[in-house]
């Protein structure tokens, strides 16, 4: 028996394990990542001493029941006795300062210890056998979660490297299942630049046999489409049809952005897989791409970002900011390139991801100019792409809001005007931008007032004969700050057109809120409303070509005409989804009652007159 | 959109990033709830409107929705949860002075009302004094503001207090506006070190440190801070005023880059609902354009369609005049309302060659 010493951590190890498993890591399965990370660090350290050296990692699962064990062996730099004492001291220290220490710790030895502790999530005993490349005796460390451990020097000399034995905890067999372990090893280690193998049930399996060169050199990916897509499908578990290579200028971050084959909501949480120094750090890194880029799912490698304590995200710092900006630029530039070389391909992407594309275009003029022809708009000529609509060779108008579009769509269609609905998400902004960038297209903003310019005025005789009726109708709506106009316009089925500017629309909701606000705020609102007041007249156009209107203005009595005008006015408000004031609702209610009375009276044989 | 019910509209809104598009759908949801006479839903939609609008340059929409909410709350306080409502009252009071139409006494009454309500809800005077300080600062009453800083710092923080980063940021702004550059930099230390941060800090703070750094440290240091700060706010409507302050720095160091910022954000500034944001943006736009013109440049800035429609002459000189006039007339409106000459003096000093 060689010399053996019993020690006890001067720490509450169960507290540490609690921090690790309940607060730091999202799942116990990360113990495998931590072990692979330790092995990788050890191999990297040994390579820096001896460039000719080639590392490897072998994982073995053996036994069953109480004797189910896992061994993870690397041929890395190994630990000396001093190293072991050092990492133990660091664990002692980190237990006092908690999570923050874990985050700050970046030295090989420090991380080694923290990584090792994570194994207590799945194992009640950890044995480490190690031989340092710096010579000295081979060492054994045996630790238990109660904080006791032993260190001893071995008589025999092991080959250089470290071997970690784990004995499976009763409720952790899932984490020792060979198929699951194989999957996890691939998941974390698919890109490791040295062979990782798994031995289980007498079978030895390579984990990372294929090392795609195009991953490190994303420019090469374009020439290997199928391979790139298949790789993405395996690592991201989704079938993709398209991708974009990524690389920052300094070459320290790169990867592949796979374009999602289905539409996603604008607020979808974006999760990308990020490899730090070829080890998977995170499969839900959200902050590595700009917000608009949620139509892609990425595999990214980097060696320049700082992971958080849990190693599952990255710190939001200036470096991350600039990496994010550059990756965003790479995606945008590639889309622009696709647009000029393979327009059909871009069209497919836009069709799937219209909203994020619009969001991006709204912020970026050159991108907007690349894609605008493929953007789809609702128009009086149907739901079409702007490119198709331009080919109509008509003058193109657009509205600023859905309300405006709704107000004029019937009239515009009847006049064969081509009007786009600028009211939906980003549309107005985009149309303004397109018209600025491409003056030759002669896109023009259309307001309801503009439409009314094409209405036919009454003749002088008509004006004279309808003079009284028009005045009466106008007076009726005066108190709602609405003026009336009698015109002739298409379509004849449309009795009236209500138009309201953006300003008066704002005033309407302001006055509505005023009705139910506390006095103080109500008077504040009225101060604000006062300055909007002058411009806030709305207009109700009556269509003399409409038979009902014609009859109303020709034969309506002094009682009937105002009542009907009020009803048409409130009807227009309801059709346009405008908030109605108490006064307007009251008018509507009185009107209904009055017309029912008239109807009943008429039924009784008295005609409309009282 | 016409046949959508309340829940569908709200779901659609939650799916959108904050901004005008989301607001329009939330407003449609509020109208729908109103037409159904459903006060609870109307309240829910408006709570979202307030929060979305206040942080994306639509203070008027926020005020309108908030007033409605507060009215419903006062009518039956037991029907609504009050914390969020009281919390959003701060946002309203924080921006109310930006509207020159609102008379001074009414602003005073609003801050008093906020204080009274907070007291009734069991909060201490810190937040009330803090908003007294902020309002005084916005009204150009700097001595008064100084007093309130001392008062609010004496009271303990509680659940209604703004976060420490926000409070510290306002103190930095205060010193920076007064030209107390040393104090501004000193106050900014915990923000620069990253110990204090939130959704708007250091975004806003950095802009207020540019001139202090330029004077007391080095152009290089100020430029680094400009790059860091600008990256955080570029293209964001909520920060039009802050962008204006970056333009102030660029007017002294890099006019060409300053014109970039001007071109990039003019459309956004023009349809910003907050006249104070517009004034600051226009003021430094005018300064930059004047300087470019004085250098003999014949450059034609890119201008948004909405602008081209109304202005014939787009030479640098006449653009500079145009924006200077807009800024000055706002400044005059504020001063008339505030009963002092703070904004005119500031604006004239900026525009002096």
Image (cartoon, rainbow, N blue to C red):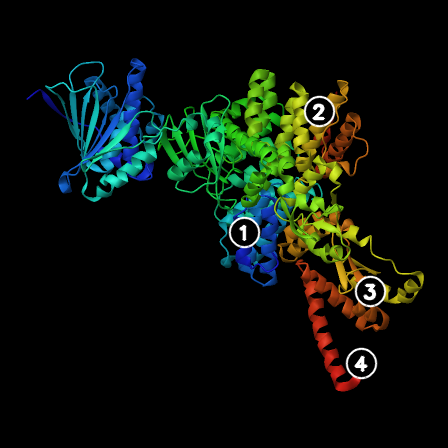
Residue B288: give its label.
2
The number of discs equals 4
**Which chain is indicated by disc 4?**
A
Q: Residues within 10 Å of mark 1 (few under 14, many from 20)?
A: some
**Are discs 4 and 2 both within one chain?**
no
**Are discs 3 and 1 both within one chain?**
no
Q: Mark 4, mark 1: which one is toward the viewer? A: 1
Q: CA distance from mark 4 to mark 2?
A: 73 Å
The answer to whether the residue labelled 1 contacts the one labelled 2, judged by CB atoms less than 8 Å apart, is no
Q: Mark 3, mark 4: which one is toward the viewer? A: 3
Q: Would you name the residue on which mark 3 appears? A: A545
* Local SS, label 3: loop
Give the mark nearest the N terminus, 1 or 2: 1
Q: Would you name the residue on which mark 1 appears? A: B12
* Local SS, label 4: loop
Residue A47 picture location, percent across and down? 30, 17
Q: Residue at x 54, y 34 (%)?
A: B200
**Which chain is indicated by disc 3?**
A
**Are discs 3 and 4 both within one chain?**
yes
Q: Quick check: A502 above or below A540?
A: above
Residue A420 picture location, percent across and down? 69, 49
Q: B154 left or right of A312?
A: right
Q: Quick check: A588 above or below B315?
A: below
Residue B58 picture location, percent across and down? 63, 43
**Residue B89 visible in the snapshot:** no
């Amino acid at each position: 028996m060689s010399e053996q010493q019993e020690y006890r951590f001067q720490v509450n190890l169960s507290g540490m394990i609690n921090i690790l498993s309940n607060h730091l890591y999202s799942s116990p399965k990360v113990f495998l990542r931590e072990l692979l990370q330790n092995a990788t660090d050890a191999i990297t350290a040994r390579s820096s001493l001896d460039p000719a050296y080639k590392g490897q990692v072998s994982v073995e699962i053996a036994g069953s029941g109480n004797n189910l064990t896992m061994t993870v062996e690397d041929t890395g730099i190994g630990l000396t006795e001093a190293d072991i004492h050092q990492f133990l001291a660091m664990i002692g220290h980190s237990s006092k300062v908690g999570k923050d220490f874990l985050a700050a710790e970046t030295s090989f030895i420090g991380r080694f210890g923290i990584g090792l502790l994570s194994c207590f999530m799945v194992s009640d005993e950890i044995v480490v056998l190690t031989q340092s490349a710096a010579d000295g005796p081979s060492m054994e460390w045996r630790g238990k979660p109660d904080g006791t451990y032993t260190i001893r020097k071995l008589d025999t000399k092991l080959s250089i490297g470290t071997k970690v034995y784990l004995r499976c905890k009763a409720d952790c067999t899932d984490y020792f299942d060979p198929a699951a372990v194989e999957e996890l090893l691939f998941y974390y280690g698919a890109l490791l630049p040295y062979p990782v193998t798994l031995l289980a049930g007498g079978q030895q399996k390579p984990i990372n046999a294929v090392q795609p060169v195009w991953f490190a050199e994303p420019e090469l990916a374009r020439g290997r489409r199928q391979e790139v897509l298949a790789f993405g499908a395996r690592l991201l578990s989704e079938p993709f049809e398209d991708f974009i290579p990524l690389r920052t200028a300094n070459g320290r971050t790169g990867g592949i952005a796979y374009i999602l084959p289905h539409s996603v909501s604008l607020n979808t949480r974006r999760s990308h897989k990020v490899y730090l120094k070829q080890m998977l750090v995170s499969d839900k890194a959200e902050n590595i791409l700009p917000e608009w880029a949620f139509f892609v799912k990425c595999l990214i490698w980097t060696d320049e970002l700082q992971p958080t304590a849990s190693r599952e995200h990255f710190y939001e710092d200036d470096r991350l900011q600039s990496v994010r900006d550059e990756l965003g630029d790479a995606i945008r530039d590639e889309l622009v390139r696709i647009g000029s070389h393979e327009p059909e391909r871009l069209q497919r992407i836009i069709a799937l991801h219209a909203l994020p594309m619009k969001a991006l275009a709204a912020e970026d003029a050159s991108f907007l100019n690349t894609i605008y022809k493929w953007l789809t708009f609702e128009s009086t000529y149907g739901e079409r792409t702007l490119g198709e609509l331009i080919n109509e060779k008509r003058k193109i108008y657009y509205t600023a809001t859905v309300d405006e579009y709704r107000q004029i769509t019937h009239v515009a269609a009847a006049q064969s005007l081509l009007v786009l609905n600028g009211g939906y998400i980003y549309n107005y902004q985009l149309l303004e931008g397109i018209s600025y960038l491409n003056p030759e297209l002669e896109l023009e903003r259309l307001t309801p007032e503009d439409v009314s310019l094409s209405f036919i005025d009454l003749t002088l005789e008509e004006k004279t004969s309808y003079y009284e009726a028009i005045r009466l109708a106008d007076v009726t709506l005066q108190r709602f700050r609405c003026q009336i106009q009698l015109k002739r316009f298409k379509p004849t089925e449309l009795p009236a057109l209500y138009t309201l500017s953006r300003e008066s629309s704002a005033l309407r909701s302001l006055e509505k809120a005023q009705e139910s606000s506390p006095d103080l705020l109500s008077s504040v609102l009225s101060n604000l409303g006062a300055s909007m007041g002058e411009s806030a007249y709305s207009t109700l156009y009556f269509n003399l070509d409409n038979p009902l209107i014609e009859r109303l203005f020709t034969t309506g009595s002094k009682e009937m005409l105002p009542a009907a005008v009020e009803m048409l006015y409130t009807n227009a408000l309801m059709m346009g989804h405008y908030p109605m004031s108490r006064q307007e609702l009251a008018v509507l209610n009185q009107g209904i009652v009055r017309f029912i009375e008239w109807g009943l009276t008429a039924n009784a044989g008295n005609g409309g007159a009282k | 959109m016409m046949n959508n019910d309340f829940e569908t509209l709200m779901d659609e809104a939650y799916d959108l990033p904050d901004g005008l598009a989301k607001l329009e759908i939330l407003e449609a949801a509020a109208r729908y709830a109103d037409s159904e006479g459903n006060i609870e839903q109307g309240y829910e939609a408006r709570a979202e409107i307030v929060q979305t609008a206040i942080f994306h340059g639509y203070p008027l929409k926020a005020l309108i929705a908030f007033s409605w909410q507060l009215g419903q709350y006062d009518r039956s306080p037991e029907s609504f949860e009050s914390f969020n409502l009281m919390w959003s009252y701060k946002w309203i009071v924080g921006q109310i002075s930006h509207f020159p139409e609102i008379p001074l006494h009414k602003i005073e009454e609003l801050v008093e009302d906020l204080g009274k309500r907070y007291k009734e809800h069991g909060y201490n005077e810190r937040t009330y004094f803090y908003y007294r300080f902020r309002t005084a600062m916005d009204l150009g009453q700097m001595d008064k503001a100084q007093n309130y800083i001392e008062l609010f710092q004496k009271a303990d923080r509680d659940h209604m207090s703004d976060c420490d980063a926000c409070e510290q940021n306002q103190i930095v702004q205060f010193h920076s506006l007064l030209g107390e550059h040393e104090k501004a930099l000193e106050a900014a230390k915990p923000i620069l070190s990253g110990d204090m941060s939130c959704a708007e800090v250091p975004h806003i703070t950095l802009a207020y440190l540019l001139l202090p750094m330029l004077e007391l440290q080095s152009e290089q240091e100020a430029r680094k801070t400009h790059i860091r700060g600008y990256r955080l706010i570029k293209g964001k409507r909520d920060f039009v005023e802050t962008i204006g302050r970056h333009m102030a720095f660029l007017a002294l160091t890099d006019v060409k880059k300053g014109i970039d910022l001007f071109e990039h954000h003019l459309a956004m500034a023009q349809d910003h609902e907050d006249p104070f944001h517009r004034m600051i943006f226009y003021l430094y736009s005018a300064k930059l354009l004047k300087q470019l013109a004085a250098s003999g440049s014949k450059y034609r800035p890119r201008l948004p369609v909405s602008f081209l429609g109304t202005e014939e002459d787009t030479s640098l000189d006449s653009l500079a005049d145009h924006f200077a006039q807009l800024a000055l007339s706002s400044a005059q409106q504020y001063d008339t309302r505030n009963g002092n000459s703070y904004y005119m003096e500031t604006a004239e000093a900026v525009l002096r060659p």
